[in-house]
Image (cartoon, helix red, strand yellow):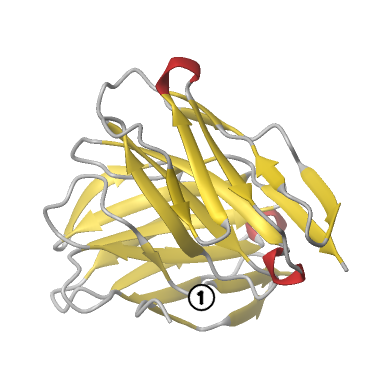
């Protein structure tokens, strides 16, 4: 158990809908990262937050947005869903102030868009 | 730009064989970090090792060993006396030492250990 929790574990929804994925980092970790794992794109970085502020953005679609709340949990919002958004979405967290810190991954949320 | 290449898409060996998973990376930074993660069939990502660019010492942990060679930009992973439980997808990843510490992953190598 990495200490990172993600809910829900599975999500099935229809095209055009909007969903919210939730992540709680390990106790004490200030950084939260979101990654998408799909068959065609592999594991890709989406976005990073550090202590409530956006720190880095990867190949995140404009239809996707995220935020980190004062209690450090994070949410990834996916809207106008398309079939191609079906993927496993991982959240990870890392300790503050350490360059190249190990990232602890949650169990992932498997999103299926039908 | 950062890039990680795992040229071996799939490897299949018989139990007790030794197997090496290759990883080649590209980065312009002089300070960077390399990682290996394991993704078993259950789907979670399990951290195996982290190595910084200034530490080229090879590492051994039980049946696992890692060979880091800056001269060839490689960070290879060897499993000795493989076991069925080693069957998984293995990812090599790179992180630069900057404000953003995102991981750039290779495409992964699916390792199957047959009894």
Q: In this view, does A4 lie to the left or right of B104?
A: left
Location of the N terminus of chain A by quadrant is bottom left
Quadrant for residue A113, please give it.
bottom right
Residue B49 as seen in the image, left or right of residue A73: right
Residue at the image point whose x is 41% and y is 58% from the top: A34
Tell me if residue A78 can be seen.
no
Question: Could you tell me if residue B77 is visible in this image?
Answer: yes
Q: In which quarter of the image is residue A80?
A: bottom right
Depth check: give the residue in front, A97 or B22.
Answer: B22
The residue under label 1 is A107
Point 11% across, 53% down: residue: A97
Mark 1 closeness class: few <14, some 14–19, many ≥20 residues within 10 Å: many
Residue B72 in percent (x, y) is at 50, 18
Return the residue nearer the eye: A45 or A69: A45
Q: Where is residue A71 in the image (x, y as percent from the top left)?
A: 16, 79
Residue at 36% across / 51% down in the picture? Answer: A47
Q: Compared with residue A80, is residue A10 higher up or lower down, i.e. above or below?
A: below
| Residue B101 drawn at (x, y percent) | 28, 44
Above or below for A88 versus B100: below
Residue at (39% x, 76% y) in the render? A2
Q: Where is residue B111 in the image (x, y as percent from the top left)?
A: 75, 54
Left or right of residue B11: residue B94? left
Q: Which part of the image, by quadrant, shows the C terminus of chain A?
A: bottom right
Residue sitting nearer the eye, B41 or A106: B41
SS at mark 1 in the image: loop
**Chain at tag 1:** A
């Amino acid at each position: 158990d990495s200490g990172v929790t993600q809910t829900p574990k599975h999500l099935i929804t229809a095209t055009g809908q909007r969903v919210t994925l939730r992540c709680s980092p390990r106790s004490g970790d200030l950084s939260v990262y979101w990654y998408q794992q799909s068959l065609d794109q592999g594991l890709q970085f989406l976005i990073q937050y550090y202590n409530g502020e956006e720190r880095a953005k990867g190949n995140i679609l404009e239809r996707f947005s995220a935020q980190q709340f004062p209690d450090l949990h994070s949410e990834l919002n996916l809207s106008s869903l398309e079939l191609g958004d079906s993927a496993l979405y991982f959240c990870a967290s890392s300790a503050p102030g350490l360059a190249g810190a190990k990232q602890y991954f949650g169990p992932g949320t498997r999103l299926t868009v039908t | 730009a950062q890039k990680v290449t795992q040229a071996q898409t799939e490897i299949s060996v018989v139990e007790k064989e030794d197997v090496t998973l290759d990883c080649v990376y590209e980065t312009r930074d002089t300070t960077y970090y390399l990682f290996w993660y394991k993704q078993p069939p259950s789907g979670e990502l399990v951290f195996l090792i982290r190595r910084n660019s200034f530490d080229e010492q090879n590492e051994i942990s039980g049946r696992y060993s890692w060979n880091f060679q800056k001269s060839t930009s490689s960070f290879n992973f060897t499993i000795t006396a493989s076991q069925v439980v080693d069957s998984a997808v293995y990812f090599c990843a790179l992180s630069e030492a900057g404000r953003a510490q995102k991981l750039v992953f290779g495409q992964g190598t699916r390792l199957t250990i047959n009894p």
